[in-house]
């Protein structure tokens, strides 16, 4: 989500005490307020126009010449910060469009017609707001970097940019017609798309046999300790084991057996009703930000989204969903053992004894970092591992120690005295259980990713304008720019990293913001005026263990777009970040993903044109098509080196 979403969708753990003035100030974040004042016309005036606006070194003053080499092992010449209608990548690379919102996924998909959209068409076409990406090489099990299945999350809909005749952002979502809501619902979920590199160019394979669209209406199974719980039952599902659809898929991960783990994040946005204020579960709704007044108008069109008609329906969202991309007939499974929160990331590591460890974040201000450890070791052929195991929440001690606290019914405060009567209760109210354990409130934990080279685990913390009380792991009050933490499990750097261990160490990798300008910003001292970043959100590691950080919420008022930045994690170039890719205005960068051979870097460019005042009729950019009347379209791109070599 970008900073506008932050105002509406990203809530805040109410537990940490703070003065109300800070809450108000945070909701009217500086960037959003500045953007709103500037307005879309002024914004468009200030933009560099065109599809591939790029400023060359010869246009720059000598003080801010982009850097290359030096103590960094990265070989590309960094880009210069700019805000533009188009995107840009470091010299010597090509940007290839792989698939856009509305492109066909299923063989009988109608051609995209932005003025004639329907739910039925959208359910066969590529969805909106692409986020997490995964690439499963074909043939299955190979390391082929030229042919495979692309998995794509579709997080949410920017209704004001996708549908003709809509108003501004909040108003357009709150007032959709039934047909418009049907388009929105079909644009959520995920896509499986077969892709292939032909003569150096990535393209979709028309009619790919495993292609699939998953939407807000795809039948799914609920498994694990919360399945069948009375609070999971609805009038459509008396057993509490089946649900339609998944919502707000943000980041994600995968398993060693080849399935995708896709994460439900801001599921609260789709539900509304008076019960949010007066219902039996009002306190639980509040902890997840489920509102009385609609954010999306879905409750008006489908009764299950009304808390007053189906008070348990929201309990069936906020989970990790496991999907087999190779079997389009398979039923996705919501794995409740992994907890219910605004899930971000679900990256696996294998402990030396074979148990699988999954790292996860809860993207809310002052919420937590989690991991799940399976009960038994993984062995070839075992594909049903995620219902049994232990969920832990992280406590970052002031002295650099890290402790993982188990969320187990009957242990510590998680008993009947606190109204927990089963493990299902603990999981449905994971956040309240973690509050009681004294987990460390973090600055919006997004992606949590394992670096396969040094064994450290990287936690990307987007920002937290509400923080008043600092702790060692979140050291800045009103943290506008976010930071990156390294978790160091015992054995990190050896062949036997103890990912399942209940203790470890942690360090801060970088504190984002502009060095010398934003208080507390901290990088490698050679970081240039172009290399600093704001709002780290997702990341990937190349085969040399270098980190590639995607941002969400860059300070556009300062002329900085979101982008992708790379840095060494070890050696003399550690935390020397460099700008590699700059997104079009209004967009965040999601899903960074390398092919196994590192010659292609896929990126999901989400909500292009989502600036204040930008609408379907008058968007701030028409990326990537730049055709009159064509709205901006979220799209997956592939970046390759012109000489075909590995990226970086
Ligand atoms: Fe969907 Fe936390 O960004
Ligand atoms: Ca997003
Ligand atoms: Ca985000
Ligand atoms: Ca995200």
Image (tube, helix red, strand yellow):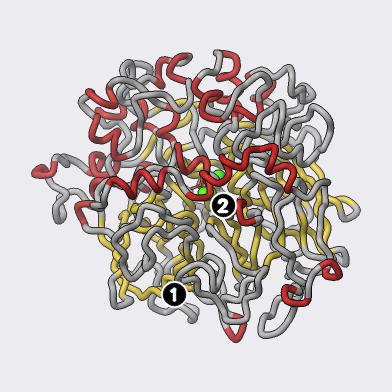
Pinpoint residue 489: horizontal percent, then vertical percent.
Answer: 40, 73
Who's the residue at 69% across and 61% down the image? 81
Q: Is residue 60 left or right of residue 334?
A: right
Pinpoint residue 171: horizontal percent, then vertical percent.
Answer: 52, 24
Q: Is residue 629 left or right of residue 323?
A: right
- Dot 1 alpha-carbon crowd within 10 angstroms: few under 14, some 14 to 19, many 20 or more: many
Q: Is residue 596 above or below residue 589?
A: below
Q: Is residue 256 above or below residue 513?
A: above
Pinpoint residue 386: horizontal percent, then vertical percent.
Answer: 40, 49
Pinpoint residue 240: horizontal percent, then vertical percent.
Answer: 33, 27
Q: Quadrant of the C terminus?
A: bottom right
SS of the residue under disc 1? loop
- Res. 614 image quadrant: top right
- Res. 424 image quadrant: top left
Mark 2 near ligand 3 (CB under 8 Å)?
yes
SS of the residue under disc 2? loop
Who's the residue at 82% across and 44% down the image? 203
Q: Is residue 330 left or right of residue 232?
A: right
Who's the residue at 65% across and 60% down the image? 564
Name the one closer to the observer, 36 or 55: 36
Residue bearing mark 1: 497
Is residue 509 visible in the rendered structure shown here?
Answer: yes
**Which of marks 2 and 1 precedes in the sequence?**
1
Is residue 120 visible in the rendered structure shown here?
Answer: no
């Amino acid at each position: 989500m970008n900073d506008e979403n932050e105002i509406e969708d990203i809530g805040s753990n109410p537990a940490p005490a703070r003065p109300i003035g800070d809450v108000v100030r945070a909701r009217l974040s500086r960037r959003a307020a500045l953007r709103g004042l500037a307005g879309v016309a002024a914004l468009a005036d200030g933009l560099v126009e065109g599809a591939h606006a790029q400023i060359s070194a010869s246009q720059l003053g000598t003080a801010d010449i982009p850097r290359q080499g030096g103590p960094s092992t990265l070989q590309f010449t960094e880009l210069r910060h700019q805000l533009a209608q188009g995107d840009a990548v470091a010299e010597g690379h090509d940007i290839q469009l792989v698939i856009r919102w509305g492109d066909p996924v299923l063989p009988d998909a109608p051609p995209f017609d932005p003025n004639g959209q329907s739910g039925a068409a959208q359910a066969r076409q590529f969805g909106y707001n692409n986020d997490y990406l995964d690439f499963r090489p074909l043939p299955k099990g190979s390391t082929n970097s030229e042919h495979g299945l692309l998995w794509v999350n579709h997080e949410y809909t920017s209704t004001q940019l996708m549908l003709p005749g809509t108003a501004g952002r909040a108003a357009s979502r709150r007032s959709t017609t039934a047909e418009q809501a049907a388009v929105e619902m079909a644009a959520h979920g995920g896509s499986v798309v077969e892709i292939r590199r032909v003569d150096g160019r990535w393209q979709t394979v028309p009619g790919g046999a495993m292609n699939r669209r998953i939407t807000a209406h795809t039948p799914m199974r609920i498994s694990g300790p919360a399945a069948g719980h009375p609070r999971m039952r609805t009038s459509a599902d008396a057993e509490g084991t089946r649900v339609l659809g998944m919502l707000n898929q943000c980041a994600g991960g995968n398993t060693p057996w080849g399935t995708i783990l896709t994460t439900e994040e801001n599921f609260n946005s789709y539900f509304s009703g008076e019960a949010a204020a007066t219902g039996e579960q009002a306190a639980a709704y509040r902890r997840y930000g489920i509102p009385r007044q609609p954010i999306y108008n879905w409750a008006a069109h489908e009764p299950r989204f009304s808390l007053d008609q189906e008070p348990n329906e929201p309990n069936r969202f906020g989970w990790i969903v496991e999907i087999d991309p190779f079997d389009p007939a398979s039923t996705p499974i919501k794995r409740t053992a992994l907890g219910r929160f605004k899930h971000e990331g679900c990256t696996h590591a294998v402990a030396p004894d074979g148990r699988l460890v999954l790292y996860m974040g809860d993207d809310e201000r002052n919420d937590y970092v989690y991991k799940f450890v399976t009960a038994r070791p993984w062995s070839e052929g075992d594909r049903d591992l995620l219902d049994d195991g232990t969920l832990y929440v992280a406590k970052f001690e002031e002295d650099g120690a890290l402790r993982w606290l188990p969320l187990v019914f009957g242990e510590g405060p998680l008993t009947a005295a606190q109204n927990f009567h089963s493990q299902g209760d603990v999981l449905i109210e994971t956040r309240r259980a973690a509050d009681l354990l004294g987990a460390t409130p973090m600055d919006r934990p997004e992606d949590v990713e394992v670096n396969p080279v040094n064994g450290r685990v990287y936690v990307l913390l987007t920002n937290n304008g509400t923080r008043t009380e600092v702790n060692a792991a979140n050291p800045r009050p009103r943290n506008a720019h976010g930071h990156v933490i390294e978790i160091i499990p015992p054995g990190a750097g050896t062949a036997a990293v103890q990912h399942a261990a209940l203790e470890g160490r942690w360090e801060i990798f970088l504190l984002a913001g502009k060095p010398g300008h934003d208080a507390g910003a901290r990088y490698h001292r050679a970081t240039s005026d172009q290399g600093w970043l704001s709002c780290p959100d997702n990341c990937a590691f190349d085969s040399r263990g270098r980190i590639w950080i995607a941002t969400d919420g860059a300070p556009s008022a300062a002329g900085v777009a979101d982008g992708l930045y790379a840095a060494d994690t070890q050696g003399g170039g550690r935390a020397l970040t460099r700008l590699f890719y700059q997104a079009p205005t209004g967009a965040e960068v999601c899903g960074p993903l390398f092919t196994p051979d590192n010659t292609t870097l896929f990126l999901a460019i989400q909500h292009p044109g989502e600036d204040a005042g930008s609408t379907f009729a008058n968007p701030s950019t028409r990326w990537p098509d730049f055709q009159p009347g064509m709205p901006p379209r979220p799209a997956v791109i592939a970046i390759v080196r012109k000489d075909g070599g590995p990226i970086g």
